[in-house]
Every structure is written in structure tokens, then in C-alpha cells.
Amino acid sequence: MVNGHRAPAISALGLRKAFGEHVVLDGIDITVPEGTVYSLLGPNGAGKTTTVQILSTLIHADGGEMRVGGYDLEAERDEVRNAIGVTGQFSAVDELLTGRENLVLMGDLQHLPKRESRRLAADLLERFDLAEAGDRPASTYSGGMTRRLDLAMTLVGDPRIIFLDEPTTGLDPRSRRVIWDLIRGLVDDFNVTVFLTTQYLEEADQLADRIAVLDQGRIVAEGTAAELKQLVPGGHIRLQFADRNALFAAATALGVSGGMVDDDEEFTLAVPSDGSVKSLRALLDRLDYEQIEVDGLAVHTPNLDDVFLTLTGHPTSEKETVS
């Protein structure tokens, strides 16, 4: 407890790391509240994996103050390791073993009693929809099944904090969404904290309570998905009208000179807006006052791709891939 409040699950102040002359992390600050999903979003080479490797005790930082699970990362590395689970970009699954054997092996590594390891393996196979495949060699699993098993193995030690380093890389869109549902379940059902790195914009948008945009070793923006989208101009409310008279009346009432479509079939007006409920209500109240009827409306806000392009000067390399 700090000043009557819970300490964050993960905190880093001035985290720095370089490999030779190449600076990978240039003094970044991170605060992750307990029971949340925090996403580090960035392209390949941005420093995401290095951040995970440092915070999960795999490598040492060059500088900074870091605490994970309430423990000092440098002075209490064993305590940190007992509090965390890690799923990397590359599977830790032993393909020569069955799914069940992989889970029991993890229990052995955690020094669990044999009976407890077998019980936990059965529970996790059921939870991750692998019960029917549990006694098949992992080499026969699809990419999505292997990632589910990998995630299940991470839970064997009952970690309070889970690091997921690009957990859906290489998966088809359907398998990716299955993993998303499982990650949400970890937070909702077990109150674990998830530190997620990803280059998939939709993944961060769907899962994260807070997102940090990492570019060239620095965090260039941080906030909720909605907060980040508001950093980018271009949001608008598109209004549709039944005829030309209503369209021009609305444009005059709202003082909008551009964003008008008048082609005898479509009468629409794009009104700049941040997309908030407050701005939408004000717009509709104004039209109601002027007795102008709206046939339909749609709110358009910038997406995370727009945010990333604006903040970094280049888009991510997000692509849907099929395994």
C-alpha cells in the first residue's frame, strides 16, 4: 500500500537499455494498475520485447527504477519470478509431449504435488477448450491450439501478473479472437494483470485498458484507446437528410462550409466533432432548435492506425496472416 492506495502491479521509471551503440529504450516510464490490461503498441524493433525481457527478469536494464508485483526488480528477482508468468512470441510447448504432459511438466517445474499437477492440467485443458486434444502430441496441434496451450502453461504457477509478448503473431483472425477472449477471461475471472505487447492495432483497441505507443525507444503517447484517438484531427459526425433544403439549412445553422454531399441521391453533411456524447447532444439540440429533421447519423472517429501514423510518422506493419 502506498499512501492508502494499492501499489501498481508494474512500475518503471526511466527504464533504459542499449546494445552497444544502439539505444533500444531511452528512459521510458510505465505504470500498470492491478487487474488491468496494459498494451505496449509499436512496430517490430520498437523495443517491446526488450521491455518484457527486462520486466520479467530475463535481462538486466542499464538504468531505471522498476518494481513488479511490489518487488524491486533488481534486489528481489526470485520474488518477481514467483509472481509472474510469461508467454513469448515463440511457443514454449514441447511438441514431443501431449498437451496434458506439457501442463504436468510445468507443474513439476513449479514443485507442485503430482496429484495437484494432474488436477490442474485437466482443469486448464477444459478451460482452454483442449480437453479432447489433451492426450494427443502437441505436434498435431494447429497454430491456434498451440498458442492456447502455451497460455495455459503460463497459468500453472498461478501468476498474479502475465507478460504476453505478441501472443497472436502468425495466427489467423479467428484464432486471434479466441485468444482475445481467453485473455479477457484471465482478467475478469482471475483478476490477473496482463502486460501485452502487440503490433496489431485492433488487438490493443479490443483488449487494453491503457495503451502506450512505443516508437524508437520512447513512449510517444499513453492513454485509453478513446483518449489516443482524440489526439488526432479528422473526427466528425455525418448527418443524412431527406432533401437538399434540409441539408443547406443544417449547414447554415451549424456554420459548416465543407464536408457536404449533394448529388440528388445522397444529402449528407460532415460536421467536425470529437465524437463525444456531449458534442453529439449539442449538435442535435441545435438542429432541433432550428426545426431541422435528421434522417440518420453516424459518428466517425480516427482509429489507432491514424493515431500511430500521426504520432510516429509511419504506419504499423499490421497484416492479417494465416497459419
Image (cartoon, rainbow, N blue to C red):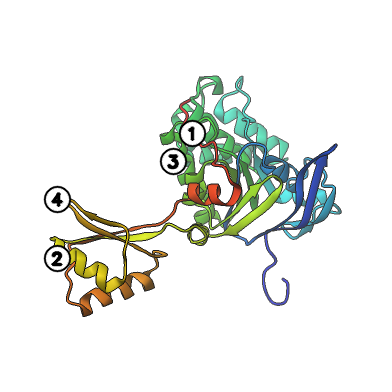
In this rendering, which labeled residue sits more in front, label 3 or label 4? 4
Q: Earlier in the sequence, mark 2 or mark 3?
A: 3
Cα distance between the residues tagged 1 and 2:
44 Å
Give the residue type at disc 4.
Answer: Glu
**Residue at 31% over, 66% down:** 256
Give the residue type at disc 3.
Answer: Arg
Quick one: label 2, few (<14), some, or many (20+) residues within 10 Å?
few
Give the residue type at disc 2.
Answer: Asn
- Please state if 269 lies on the left or on the right of 190 as rendered: left
Element class at badge 2: helix
Cα distance between the residues tagged 2 and 3:
46 Å
Residue 177 image label: 3
Element class at badge 4: loop
Residue 265 image label: 4
Q: Which residue is mark 2?
A: 245
Residue 6: percent from the left, percent from the top? 67, 69
In this rendering, which labeled residue sits more in front, label 2 or label 3? 2
Q: How many marks?
A: 4
Residue 128: percent from the left, percent from the top? 48, 39
In this rendering, which labeled residue sits more in front, label 1 or label 3? 1
Residue 31: percent from the left, percent from the top? 67, 60
Element class at badge 3: helix
Cα distance between the residues tagged 1 and 4:
36 Å
